[in-house]
Amino acid sequence: SCEGTRDLYGRLSASIDSGPSAASDSGVVDDAEKPAEWGEGIDLAERRLVFGREISPLTSTTSAQRVGMAARRIATLGLLAAPLGVMVPLNVVLGKAAGKPAPRNEGGEDGTGRKPTLLQRWHRSVTRSTWDYALWAVETAGPTYIKLVQWASTRNDLFSPEFVGHFAKLQDETRGHSWRETERALVRAYGRDWRDVLSFDAVIDDGLDDDDDAAGDGGGGGGSLMRKKGGAANRSRQARLGRRETRVPSSSPPTVPIGSGCVAQVYKARLRRSHGLHPAGTSVAVKVQHPNILEKVCLDFYIVNKLAALLERVPYLNLDYLSVKDSVDQFRDIMLPQLDLRVEAHNLRRFRRDFQGETQIAFPEPMMGLTSREVLVERFVEGEPMLNFVRREDGEHSREDREELARIGLETVMKMIFLHDFIHADLHPGNMIVDRNRSVRGSPIRITMIDCGLTVELGERDHMNLVKILGSLIKRDGYAAGALMVDAAKKCQGSELDVELFCRGIEKICIDDEDNNFLESVGDYISDICYLACRHRVKLEAAFINAALACEIMEGLAASLYPSMEVQSVALPMVLKAEMMHGLKNLPSPRLGGLW
């Protein structure tokens, strides 16, 4: 509640004012050192621009060629979406004609004892086929769209249960590529003698027997295959791919991946010889990039960038003030590095450094000497997917564990945003593994975050602006937050009256929503702030929008695990540490007393 936020902030502020000893006892000054990267004087924007030019296959093409490639890509996406233009209306019509069926019992009858009518059966069949096709179409469209839908499927407060239930499958399993493509990538990385480096496990046990897999593969056609998850889906897929590869025999038998994401798929393997401190036989995860995805991703961003620029020029929409194009460019800048797995290896090293000494958060250890652009090798992490804790509460997934996981996850993200300026930008349950830290007394529950290719880094100046804005919102100083958004904006065409009305609008949002805290209702705040920005012609910082979205995604995950958690008890200490880190603690906040 707002009252609790005021009390907590007051206690923490008093501890700081009492001196370093009291502040240390309250935990506020821990980890308040600035990231070492800020002292290197690196121009992050220039570095991203150079990297994008180097990696993009569009750099060497002419304008006419890019337009032609974009036209073909749009046509492909249009063909993928076209069947939904028929299936969705048909489903709606059948649903209205069939009426709402009563709940069915185990015998397939409804609650009145009657079997479903023919129209009701057709409606169920079309509904199932529509969702299955939509899932297949998103996977076929490529990594950009899979990422967007992965994010959407974490927000059960914004999307329907049916949407979340069907697309949540993308969080831990997408369609992968054949073993032949994997073998080609291994040859490019290690040469033809790659078997002297890695020994792959032929079969990964996921707790499902062959009868279960065979039964799933035999009935229901493509729909049942699309509904499978985990190793069973990979075994079925790999079997089908293997049958297609019989024309040119592979030099080694196909190996089953343990998981597949939108950019790469992962295998379990062992080192054939020692590497650094890791002896031969060490279990490793080998991440192999999907073939031919670089051009897809670059074309997608080229198209969306042009579309955003066009929409920003439309009069009266005022979309320019939402930084739509800037946000697209920033998303492109954090997406493209994921297509070079060496970048992910460096990201893992930095996360391990930032969270060194933590007992309940971990990151896999990369093996830099075995990593290339297409292949990443890291220590294998044993554990259970976070999705299991999100989806159910039972004897093995207790309420206490769920609540503790929510706290760990939220605290980790707050540290990334406010203290480290290095944010994991692909946070969904499929990228978190849960285990017990046996090396610590009591074996506390621990989260290992994987798939760290997508990251957000702001730099000292932008980070200071972000801390000011988010800190003001969390402390419910709406007027100050509005003024900071305007001051930080690169472009503001509003008059002085527009600026004043914008700031008072943000203030009113905080007053009207007094019973809630910013981090507990990020989505509502973002919508209202964007509306005010358009109305009063104030351009928002893309950094603020993207960081707020990271908060929102973690808010959705935390709400799934621990709906009643008081987010401010975790967030406020981080805000105060960040303010101290930037020397902002003693800055005047004239409107704060009026609000509180």
Image: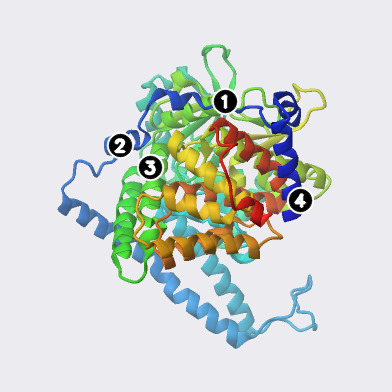
Q: Which residue is mark 2?
A: 55
From the top left corner, tell me how far across and down residue 151 is, in percent. 54, 53
> Which mark identifies residue 4?
4
Query: Spatial distance from mark 1 to mark 4, Cα to Cα?
Result: 28 Å
- At label 2, the amino acid type is Ile
> How far, Cα to Cα, is label 4 from label 3?
39 Å
Q: Is residue 370 visible?
A: yes
Q: Residue at x 39, y 70 (%)?
A: 82
* Residue 483 x/y as whole percent: 48, 53
Q: Of helix, strand and loop, which one carries label 4?
A: helix
At label 3, which amino acid type do we have? Asp
> Amino acid under label 4?
Gly
Query: What is the number of the mark on residue 333?
Result: 3
Task: Point out the frontmost of discs 1 and 3.
Answer: 1
Q: Which residue is mark 1?
A: 33
Mark 2 or mark 1: whose residue is earlier in sequence: 1
Who is closer to the viewer here, 458 or 427?
A: 458
Q: Earlier in the sequence, mark 1 or mark 3?
A: 1
Q: Residue at x 73, y 43 (%)?
A: 10
Q: In 3D space, how far apart are the residues under numbered discs 3 and 2 (Cα atoms)?
A: 11 Å
Identify the secondary structure beneath mark 3: helix
Could you tell me residue 13's position as x and y percent?
A: 70, 38
| Quadrant assignment, res 201 | top right
Q: In the figure, 504 relative to 446: above or below?
A: below
Q: Residues within 10 Å of mark 2 (few under 14, many from 20)?
A: some
